[in-house]
Amino acid sequence: MYKLLIVDDEPLIQVGIKSMVNWEKLNIELVGTAMNGQIALNMIEESSPDIVITDLKMPVMDGMELIRLCRERYGGERPWFIILTSYEDFHLVKEAITYQVTDYLVKLELTPDSLTEAIIRVTEHIRRSESRLASSENLIHGFYDKFFIRLLNNLFESEEQFLLQSRELNLDLHYGGYVCCYGEMLGSRSEELSSQPMETQLTRFSASMQMLKELSGKYCPTYSLSLDTRHFALIFCFEAAEKADSWVPLTKKALQGISQALTRYYNISFRCGIGNLVNHPLAICDSYQSSRQACRHTTAEEPIYCLEKHARKSPPDYSSFNISLFKADLTRAFEEYDSEVLKKTLDSLCELFLMHPGHYVQVLDGVCNILYLSISLLQDGEQIVSEFFRDNPDGYRSVYKQTSVEQLVNWLEFFEKQLCRLFDSRHGDYKNHIVTNVKKYINEHLGKRLSLNEVAAVFGISPNYLSQLFGKYNDLGFSEYINTCKVRESKRLLDEGTLKIYEIADKLGFESSFYFSKVFKKVEGVSPTEYLNGKF
């Protein structure tokens, strides 16, 4: 249900609105009433209503000031305002609209029908806004996962690409030190989690990851990534790398606290390896590799293992497979659904593995790395890879049941065949799929100065390649498409009549109102001013 607050200094108006309609049928919960804007502001902070119906003229703090303060404090559109006005105050409505007021009601004309219609309109606005937000969050979540998979496996083509993508995702990676932890979720018995139905595993793992993310952030800034339904990575960020004496106990304390909470709430424990401290974000891949090595040393008696603490007892083993050696071919294969490149790359790896039959641990590490990469880079990767192994009672986690290098290679060859079959089925339309997602991204970021280089970096492809795809799979080129979308949005804003031309230019990321007018005229054939004059 949506929560509603009524704000008016006249008690009769409050009572009238409360009793005028059946709020429950409208899916509305009344959370209270307020006599002025100051009381309302306090109630908004306490109860976070979705909708506020407010009078404009009130003592202490009027409705206009209430709306303005809410926009300054909370930004965005929430709470959604419906204003009450009188005919003599109608000139205030236009000013209120500049603060994104959704609707207005004239007090003398207020009826059950007009109130109901206003509520239906605002709830529809809320639903559309939530739908856009969910769509944007899903898109960002996909970018987030791919970004950290690239970071952990050293798959960025350049530091510039890394910086562009981290900035686009609003990620703060300007700390003095970083430590990566690699872990595995366990049930009360080591096999309990993997023996449950996939839906149950996903639910428990998702809830556990959410708790893990929330709790780790209480100790220091942290980024988390799920690798499959049992394995995860955590990146702890420290203000100063030179304070090396404090990061080990802090990291262990955080992991121990998380472990206790997971056991208490979900009957889940985990084993976790703590990697080495690095002082640059692009070196996090080294910490990740060492954390995977550390995790192999964990036991029931010592479920959290730190390489730094045991460095003298067991020297670091850097023979672990590093997927970055094959990054160019693997990245191309997954981005372009190129089965030939994938097969050639994985066949070469299989040959390499078979040449070292005594390196079982390193081969297992390498095969798992490819598994995690596939799950993260494929859309709906968890479900797709699970389907590959639907006839195996252990699913894709059967990789851990392989007891020799030869068995691991056989497992990888089967996985390769399934991936190649999938790539062949998708190869025909993946390019159009990229263009579709880029167009969606552009329309959700019209307020930014979108450049070919930056958008290409967000999607992990080269600018020239993106330009070629747009030319082939869209009626307009990249720049022309952006200009068309921005001009279309500017026409909507001009029609609303609440912003000046220079304000619209700034809102849509144009470098100047002159350049905006130039682009507008090129697309529409008339200037913004001529467009407005032609309307009246």
Image: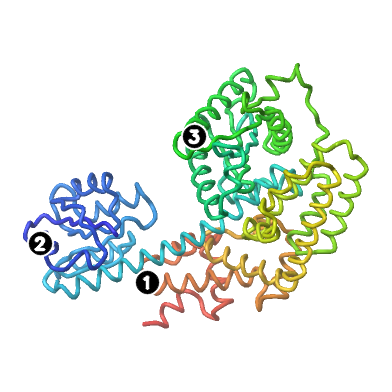
Crowd around label 2: few <14 · some 14–19 · many ≥20 (10 Å)? some
Q: Answer with the quarter of the image where residue 516 lies.
A: bottom right
State the residue at coordinates (71%, 20%). Answer: 310
Q: Quadrant of the N terminus?
A: bottom left
Q: Pick whichever, 450 or 522, lies toward us.
A: 450
State the residue at coordinates (81%, 40%). Answer: 321
Q: Are marks 1 and 2 in contact (CB under 8 Å)?
A: no
Q: Pick whichever, 186 or 182, lies toward us.
A: 186
Q: Which residue is mark 2?
A: 13
Q: Amino acid at mark 1?
A: Glu
Q: Secondary structure at mark 3?
A: helix
Q: Pick whichever, 444 or 60, lies toward us.
A: 444
Query: Is residue 72 toward the left or the right of residue 317 in the image?
Result: left
State the residue at coordinates (64%, 34%). Answer: 181
Check the image and name the residue furthest to the left.
12
Q: Secondary structure at mark 1?
A: helix
Q: Quadrant of the C terminus?
A: bottom left
In percent of width and height, residue 137 lies at 51, 56
In terms of sequence position, does the residue under pointer 3 or pointer 2 come before the other?
A: 2
Q: Which residue is mark 3?
A: 263
In percent of width and height, residue 450 lies at 60, 60
Q: In this rendering, is residue 346 above or below 432?
A: above
